[in-house]
Image (tube, helix red, strand yellow):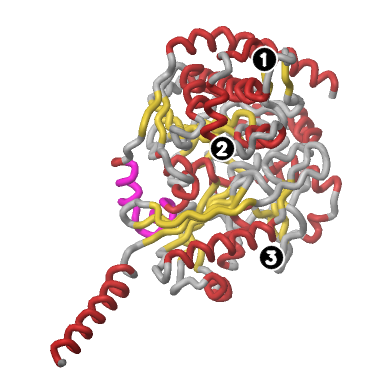
Amino acid sequence: MWHQLSKIIINSFSKLFIEHYIINKLFMWLGLYLSTDEIVGQVVDENLKPVSLKRRPIITYTPKSGYAEQDPEEWWNTLLVVAKDIIHELKGKKISAISVTSQREGLVFVNEQGESLGRCIIWMDTRALKESEYLKRRIGKNTIYNFTGLPIDATFSFPRLLWIKEHTPILRKTKYYLQPKDYIVYKLTGKFSTDPTLACRTLLYDIRRLEWIDEFFKDFHIPNLFPPIVKSTDIVGFVKEDVVQKLGLKGNVPIIEGGGDRPVQMLAAGAKKTGEFVEHIGSVVNLSTILDTPKLFGDSKIGVGLHVIDGKWLAEASVSAGGLILNWLKELLGVEKEGDTLIDYNVSQVPPACEGLLFIPHLQGARAPWWTAYSKGTLYNLTLKHTKWYIIRAFMESISYEIKLAFDMFKENEIVPTEIVCLEKMDKLRTWHIIKSSCINFPYTFTNLDEPTSFGSALLAMYGNGQKELVNEWIRKRNFSKIEPNKELIKVYEKALSRYVKTVKYSLNYYKKAS
């Protein structure tokens, strides 16, 4: 009997030891991501393995043409649900640190109590078009670019603040301008802050001196109500006690300041030097590479901003909306429930170049290489012969053409790609990846991560939590897959690209006159 009792005690002690001294000693980091479409949370452990991934959609409101808004309180409530789901799945395992990543260029106005004063004007809102044209005349695009590394565009904070000052009384009640990530960090910690990767997306921040451009605020009578800037890798605070209780967190959990989604994606892709490009087809398509200095480019079509890693910058080109339009097309054409495998198969059956059908994907204006808010989405040469799969393939080809043109911009500025890492999975819409690779005539490498941005956010949480070497290990050991360009398609798309460029130039001229 004593032998059996001893065995039970030993087994019980062993179980407790495993639970409390091994499982709970595993280090885990939570990356939160507020994208245009959803809130995502992902936990990554010390073995660089995803442990939990949860996501929930959010709504974009478009009350008028050119408007795009989201509700900050909806962000917060959705994020609480996502975080609760993750913490429940972890079953008591401790989170070492949390980092927050978000879409960029949004503006949330908050009062003294930190309450939002209305919806956030998000990145794709173009209501400040007239104000951006005014800035071009008053200051000049080259002057602003030389300070900020950005072209003048209606999607950035400077023209939007001019619009707000002219059309609403909200500035009189405002304590701080917060970007999307900043609002979530405030709700988690009670601290007001921002970081360089978001500050540099305002048209009001000097990317070389690393400070606000005081004369812009003064000359245009705009109060500088942006919060203090801290490094992306700094601990900005700890999760507030009331939030700890709501979420069921264990202990004091530090919040790493975090940053904008593009630079965080560079971590997920393992990019470390100039020429290693990262492509992400989120709501908008973005191409980025790392710079060691804040090098500027003469034509101002390549944006330059800060990386989440101190002492590094990014050169980037955001081309026309990608995933946003694809999702819209899938719903419009009734194929949203078909699944990516079936969509990919049907698109692969359409002849390359779609027998003359062209799709100009400028439904929210045009970014690189065109940089104009006047352009509109357009279908050319549409006939009764063309099915929904032709339209979807024509869209995929148009985005591929624009990516090709963006890479040409980089090459003209002596940045030649040595690698292109695509953040999507290789077998998700594989036909599109083959089209892109063939259009550019360059192989594509794939991370094959389920959700790369929140993974990168978790890496940033590691970095800020004193585990820089783990992030370096991810960069060293990455094992990605590859797609090569199709030789036959290369020739087809060389001819199709020329026709596409002529058509876009014609349509830009038309829409500008019509406006």
Circles 3 and 2: CB atoms closer than 8 Å: no
- Disc 3: which residue: 114
Q: Secondary structure at mark 3?
A: loop
What crowding class fits label 1: few (fewer than 14 Cα within 10 Å), some (14-19), or many (20 or more)?
some
Residue 438 drawn above or below residue 57: above
Q: Is residue 320 left or right of residue 332?
A: left
Q: Quadrant of residue 397?
A: top right
Q: Secondary structure at mark 1?
A: loop
Indicate the amino acid at tag 1. Leu
> Which residue sits furthest bottom?
2
The image shows a total of numbered marks equal to 3
Please provide the residue range marked out in magenta. 459-475
Indicate the amino acid at tag 3. Gly
Q: Secondary structure at mark 2?
A: loop
The residue shown at (52%, 63%) is: 85
Q: Is residue 215 visible?
A: no
Q: Is residue 116 left or right of residue 450?
A: right
Q: Position of residue 264 (x, y in %)?
A: 48, 45
Indicate the amino acid at tag 2. Gly
The residue shown at (54%, 44%) is: 261
Q: Position of residue 344 (x, y in %)?
A: 53, 28
- Disc 1: which residue: 357
Q: Is residue 81 left or right of residue 484?
A: right
Q: Position of residue 48 (x, y in %)?
A: 34, 51
The residue shown at (39%, 68%) is: 93
Residue 119 drawn above or below residue 497: below
Q: Position of residue 511 (x, y in %)?
A: 80, 20
- Disc 2: which residue: 339
Q: Is residue 395 visible?
A: yes
Q: Quadrant of residue 25?
A: bottom left
